[in-house]
């Protein structure tokens, strides 16, 4: 292992001790299944019109079978005959020992946040799912139980603010339908539990709305979690205040779930484990990028990537990959963060991204006329080579450009990344219409010459 040093996470302290990291809706699983794009490609033969990008394989429920085929992965959700789903939201009693007289909260505001979350699902899925609010728990098939107390901490530093109770048993098998290659199923999840306070006190209503949004995804049929941080169904709370709608991946995945036949069979989990993955291969063909650039008006940049690459918008930027976001060979991620200097960004906000990575080397360089920190890393498994360019934009923002490729193939993929980055244009804050230059690869331009040589391991 190059470097032999594990980079540890740092905390962002904003006037008080950091809150325990929230965990959304974790539930026991029967065993581990790692979605594979080969399985997804086989599934697409039968259902070629699925919206993409999506995280559909992470939604499946697993059923044991006494068969050499292994366990079955099944899609399960409410049927249209169960719509609208009758929902009861209780008015919570707030624990007086948690109340802060300087930050008053109203229990009615938490109820409204839950109602808003229901409306977001209805709106963003264009009526594929429908809810009706009822006055008593006895009238409901789904209860959103708001608990006005501090959340439990099942493991150190990880609070469980939300939970989809009995998710593991929500999908019930009614037998196999061999003629249709699907399972007859019935889905019903009776309760979501949302704790309204953490160690720092009662949560803002925006956070509670985000919690309910996430747990409703489980209540609608999703067994697992999204692997993408910009999705509502990602297992960490993340940028809660900025998420007022489902992401494109969220929408595509749930539309697929509700348009697929109930009990559709995604595939099987081999009893002896997954088949060996093909060895990485170098890229083939030229490095030509799409003529139409991707424009991020929110963060003030544009970039061109190969036309076949998929992109996923994230709260602070965009993620590109040469395959599904959850299983690909190479990727390119760009995001912009409010920080006056690289040092401030690294101290405050880079810890979670670095956690578990193995350090190779670092260097201070100049990229596109801007002060830049270059980091070369490896993932914990030693399979992925990662390079960061942390660029100081000079207007109170930092851009992070992260590339990933298989270890041993960095040189083969570098021209692809260089071609993409040569097209990158960045606009100053508040002046999206005026480009101020581009970020080019430091190894191919005079501007990329090193200002300092600090490649020592830390």
Image (cartoon, rainbow, N blue to C red):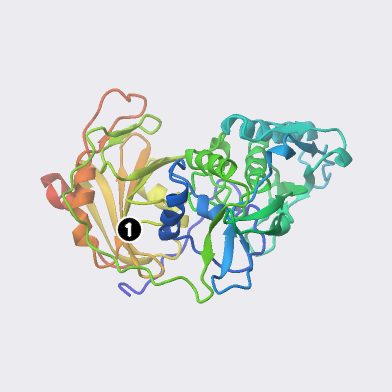
> Is residue 152 among the parts visible in the rendering?
no
Q: Nearer the viewer, residue 271 or 216?
A: 271
**Residue 125, image x, y percentages:** 58, 34
**Residue linked to disc 1:** 329
Tell me the residue at 62%/40% (across/down).
Answer: 210
Q: In the image, 70: left or right of 337?
A: right
Quarter containing the C terminus = bottom left
Can you give x and y, in whole percent of width and height, for residue 44 in the image? 44, 50
Q: Residue at x 54, y 74 (%)?
A: 271
Q: Quadrant of residue 404?
A: bottom left
Considering only vertical position in the picture, is 224 above or below 231?
below
User: In the image, what residue occupies the spot 48% across and 49% down?
Assistant: 228
Query: Extreme left residue here?
Result: 446
Task: Say left or right for 434 vs 123.
Answer: left
Residue at x 25%, y 44% (from the top left corner): 306
251 relative position to 137: left or right: left
Residue 231, given in percent of the width and then of the height, sits at 52, 44
Image position of 26 (left or right of 259):
right
Q: Secondary structure at mark 1?
A: loop
Q: How many marks?
A: 1
Q: Is residue 186 visible?
A: yes
Picture quarter with the N terminus:
bottom left
Picture coordinates of residue 79, whole percent (x, y) = 68, 42
**How many residues crowd around disc 1 within 10 Å: few (fewer than 14), some, or many (20 or more)?**
some
């Amino acid at each position: 292992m190059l470097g032999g040093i594990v980079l540890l996470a740092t905390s962002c302290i904003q006037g008080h001790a950091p809150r325990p990291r929230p965990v959304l809706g974790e539930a026991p699983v029967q065993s581990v299944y790692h979605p594979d794009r080969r399985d997804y490609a086989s599934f697409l033969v039968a259902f070629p019109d699925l919206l993409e990008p999506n995280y559909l394989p992470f939604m499946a429920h697993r059923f044991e079978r006494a068969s050499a085929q292994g366990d079955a992965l099944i899609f399960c959700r409410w049927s249209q005959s169960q719509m609208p789903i009758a929902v009861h939201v209780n008015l919570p009693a707030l624990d007086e020992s948690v109340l802060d007289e300087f930050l008053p909260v109203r229990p009615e505001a938490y109820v409204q946040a839950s109602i808003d979350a229901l409306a977001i699902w209805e709106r963003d899925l264009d009526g594929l799912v429908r809810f009706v609010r009822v006055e008593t728990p006895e009238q409901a098939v789904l209860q959103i139980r708001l608990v006005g107390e501090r959340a439990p901490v099942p493991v150190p530093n990880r609070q469980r603010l939300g939970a989809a109770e009995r998710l593991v048993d929500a999908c019930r098998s009614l037998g196999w339908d061999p003629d249709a290659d699907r399972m007859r199923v019935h889905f019903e999840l009776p309760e979501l539990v949302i704790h309204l306070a953490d160690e720092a006190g009662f949560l803002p209503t925006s956070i509670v709305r985000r919690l309910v949004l996430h747990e409703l995804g489980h209540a609608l049929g999703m067994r697992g979690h999204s692997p993408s941080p910009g999705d509502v169904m990602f297992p960490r709370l993340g940028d809660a205040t900025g998420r007022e709608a489902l992401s494109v991946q969220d929408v595509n995945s749930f539309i697929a779930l509700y348009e697929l036949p109930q009990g559709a069979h995604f595939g099987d989990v081999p009893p002896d484990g997954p088949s060996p993955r093909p060895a990485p291969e170098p890229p083939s063909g030229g490095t030509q990028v799409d003529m139409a650039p991707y424009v991020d008006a929110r963060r003030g940049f544009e970039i061109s990537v190969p036309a076949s690459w998929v992109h996923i918008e994230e709260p602070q930027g965009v993620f590109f990959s040469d395959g599904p976001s959850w299983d690909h060979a190479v990727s390119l991620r760009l995001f912009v963060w409010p920080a006056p200097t690289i040092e401030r960004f690294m101290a405050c906000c880079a810890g979670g991204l670095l956690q578990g990575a193995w350090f190779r080397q670092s260097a201070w360089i100049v990229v596109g006329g801007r002060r830049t920190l270059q980091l070369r890393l490896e993932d914990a498994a030693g399979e992925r080579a990662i390079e960061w360019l942390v660029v100081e934009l000079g207007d109170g923002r930092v851009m992070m450009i992260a590339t990933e490729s298989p270890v041993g193939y960095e040189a083969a993929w570098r021209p692809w990344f260089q071609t993409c980055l040569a097209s990158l244009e960045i606009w100053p804050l508040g002046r999206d219409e005026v480009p101020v230059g581009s970020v080019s690869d430091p190894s191919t331009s005079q501007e990329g010459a090193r200002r300092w040589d600090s490649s020592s391991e830390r």
